[in-house]
Amino acid sequence: MSLQTTITPHSQAPYVERTYPTPAELDAAIAAAAAAQPFWAATPLAQRIAIGRAFIKEFEALKEEIPLELTLQMGRPVQQGPGEVRGLVERSNYMLDIAPTALADVSLADTDKPGFKRYIKRVPIGVVFVIAPWNFPYLTTINSLLPALLAGNTVLLKPSPQTPLTAERIAAAFARAGLPPNVLTVLHLGPEGVAQTINAKQVGFVSFTGSVPVGRTIAETAAKAPGFTGTGLELGGKDPAYVAPDADLDFTVAELVDGAFFNSGQSCCSIERIYVHAAVYEPFVAKFVALTKEYKLGDPTTGHTNLGPVVSLASAERIRKQVADAVAQGARSLVPENLFPAAKPGTTYVGPQVLVNVNHTMDVMTEETFGPVVGIQRVSSAAEALELMNDSRYGLTASVWTDVECQPRADESEYITPAELVEYTAKGEVGEGLFDRMVEGLETGTVFLNRCDYLDPALAWSGVKDSGRGVSLSKFGYDQLTRPKSVHMKISLKTSV
């Protein structure tokens, strides 16, 4: 039997161990999930929703225990843990609220011919395999898990080896809420177990959140599996921001610093590259660096720390190498290393870093960092920014920072004159005209205005290019977890077509 050990990032001490099932045990678990699915699908939707509501109450009862437990698994500062609990509740409530309409039959009564009735049912796929990541394990798991269950599927849930307790907490809360046995099964698996599960004939869909290389492997495995197993892949990002000349710099800097360094930058939609109009480049960089220097890097279990370790020693070394390579190519680092003495080689602590004099020949501006590092590049126009923002193999989110109301502010005299604001507005370099052009031109799944690094459960969460395929959240999140079944009825046998 293979043993899985979770290492606490900041101490490098073993935290929990789990044993992988044998191939026979895994086959039995998959078969049990498949056997339970028809009965779960026959459960009235109202009852499934009631169990979902009860799950939220059971999960919220754990809100005092989860933050520290999560910190010890993956390293995020304990003060930031409650946000993940609140996020799960917000997303769950929304997906529960829309379930009756999202899963309702699609009527075609308006276009039915006399003597005929047609409609489209949404029916469950069967058994859904959810492979969750470690960086936001509760939030990302619930994105697919809850709508899969509400749609009448049974779910096999594989947590990351870094955060095994998160799946167990979710499953226990659902059990207390009244979810029947084998409707949700937690599986701790290695690569062989993952492949065995994807290849199981009973599994109809795989929902994966993680890296591009692993996502590609899962897609290839699913494509060769019996039954043409479907996949939903939420993969990496190299998310850009554009700061227009009329942006409110104090507000914008605060938001982008948080968007870059929250969870030590370990988010698929964290800000990793920023393009700033030349008119406000210098003050923007100065304010950004000043705020970055205020971060507190250290033990994530203490309340005053707002920047914890990255997930592993290997990750820390990879991030340091990317920064060092950029500096060797001409980039300039603006945050002295001695401000963050905990960030030493051989540890998982990586100090926040701001790089300028960067360009797209450097990996730091083109390849995912997944760490507390951001590159800031000067641009002369929105057109230049758009070209650079799209110059990426990723396409998850992008943000634009401008005042769509084009209202002069008292602090603008510091950076641009009223006459310059009028000129920028006329050219479509600021305001609503700029944002509309960016929305049309950006090759990305989500476009933000004056916000970043956030998932709104009412909006479809998806990516383009190497950021994946498929969709979660919103009413569209139910579509990939169901299949359409068309019903065509000839009611009157005397009717001819």
Image (tube, grey):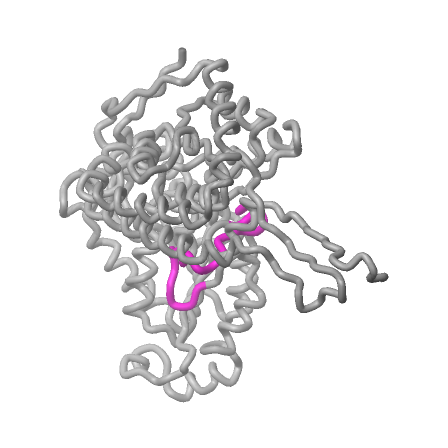
Residue 191 percent across, percent down from the top left: 49, 23
Q: 84 or 335, which lies in front?
A: 84
Main SS, magenta region, reads loop
Which residue of the protein is positioned furthest toward the left in this rendering?
A: 303
Residue at x 56% of width, y 32% of height: 218
98 falls in the magenta region: no
Residue 230 percent across, percent down from the top left: 60, 38
The answer to which quarter of the image holds residue 140 is top left
Residue 171 percent across, percent down from the top left: 34, 34
The quarter of the image holding the N terminus is top left
Q: Is residue 140 left or right of residue 288?
A: right
Which residue of the protein is positioned furthest toward the right in this rendering?
A: 496
The answer to which quarter of the image holds residue 327 is top left
- Kindly tell me whether residue 312 is visible in this rendering: no
Q: 141 or 377, which lies in front?
A: 141
Residue at x 21% of width, y 28% of height: 11
Residue at x 53% of width, y 68% of height: 438
457 falls in the magenta region: yes
Q: Is residue 107 left or right of residue 141?
A: right
- Kindly tell me whether residue 78 is visible in this rendering: yes
Residue 220 percent across, percent down from the top left: 62, 32
> Vertically, is 418 above or below 78?
below
The answer to which quarter of the image holds residue 278 is bottom left
Residue at x 47% of width, y 48% of height: 237
Which residue of the protein is positioned furthest toward the top in this rendering?
A: 1
Instruction: Give the magenta range.
Output: 448-471
